[in-house]
């Protein structure tokens, strides 16, 4: 990978041997390995048994989970907040595992639409709640620093499954609690 990064530096007119760039190929490789580390994570290992029996059937929400990802179209960052709500059916997640799920899927080349749905789907598959809602708000560098250059643009995506899709009162409660 480092050889290819050197070629890219040369192709854009830079000298990869100049002082400030000598170690850049190695740094870029390490950065890309971290930013795409979600491909190598096993969801079962990530959750690591942090699912607990609980007779709670009230909505559980974790909001403002920050995330950083890279769009698959331009390989530029997009970042923002993820809000997750679910109504358990006898099982709840250890709260930190929801943040780890967000990171796992965000650390791949992504589309925000797919990312939102992947998070909702894995929660539904893993603990089979009555319903799950995921809302993501993000700024995309491909919109702000190139292309149309709209600095204040924000993309919002949602995935509503089970009761969050079927019942407007459940969906509205979730949206009101996350203040969107």
Image (cartoon, grey):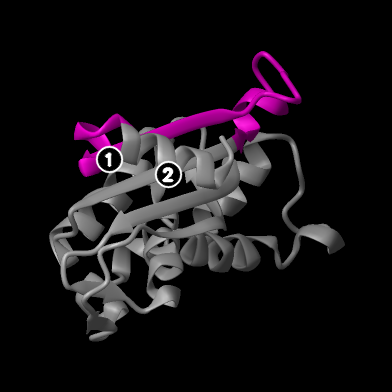
Asked if the residue under mark 2 is in contact with the one under mark 1, i.e. CB atoms within 8 Å, the reply is yes
Image coords of residue 69 (percent x, y): 51, 49
- Residue 11, above or below 90: above
Image coords of residue 85 (percent x, y): 38, 53
Q: Is residue 71 shown to the viewer in this render?
A: no
In terms of depth relative to the viewer, which is nearer, 146 or 170?
170
Relative to 100, 159 lies left or right: left
Residue at horizontal 50 percent and vertical 67 percent from the top: 34
Dot 2 surroundings within 10 Å: few (below 14), some, or many (20 or more)? many
Q: Is 161 in the magenta? A: yes
Q: Quadrant of residue 39?
A: bottom left
Rendered-image quadrant of the C terminus? top right
In terms of depth relative to the viewer, which is nearer, 74 or 158?
158
Q: Is 165 in the magenta? A: yes
Image coords of residue 114 (percent x, y): 32, 38
User: Which is nearer the N-term, disc 1 or disc 2?
Assistant: 1
Residue to which mark 1 is pinned: 164
Q: Which mark is on residue 174?
A: 2
- Residue 142, above or below 48: above
Residue at horizontal 46 percent and vertical 66 percent from the top: 99
- Residue 85, above or below 31: above
Dot 1 surroundings within 10 Å: few (below 14), some, or many (20 or more)? many
Alpha-carbon distance for marks 1 and 2?
Answer: 8 Å
Q: Secondary structure at mark 1?
A: helix
Image coords of residue 111 (percent x, y): 40, 36
**Magenta residues, as a range?**
139-168
């Amino acid at each position: 990978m480092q050889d290819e990064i050197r070629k890219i530096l040369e192709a854009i007119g830079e000298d990869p041997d100049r002082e400030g760039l000598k170690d850049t190929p190695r740094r870029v490789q390490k950065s890309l390995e971290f930013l795409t580390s979600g491909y190598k994570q096993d969801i079962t290992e990530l959750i690591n048994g942090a699912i607990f029996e609980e007779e709670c059937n009230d909505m559980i929400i974790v909001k403002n989970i920050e995330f950083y990802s890279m769009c698959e179209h331009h390989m530029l960052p997009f970042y923002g907040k993820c809000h997750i709500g679910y109504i358990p059916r006898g099982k709840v997640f250890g709260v930190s595992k929801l943040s780890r799920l967000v990171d796992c899927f965000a650390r791949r080349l992504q589309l925000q639409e797919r990312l939102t749905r992947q998070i909702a789907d894995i929660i539904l598959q893993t603990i089979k709640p009555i319903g799950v809602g995921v809302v993501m708000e993000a700024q995309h560098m491909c919109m702000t620093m190139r292309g149309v250059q709209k600095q204040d643009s924000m993309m919002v995506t949602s995935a509503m499954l089970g009761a969050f899709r079927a019942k407007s009162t459940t969906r509205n409660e979730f949206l009101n609690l996350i203040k969107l």
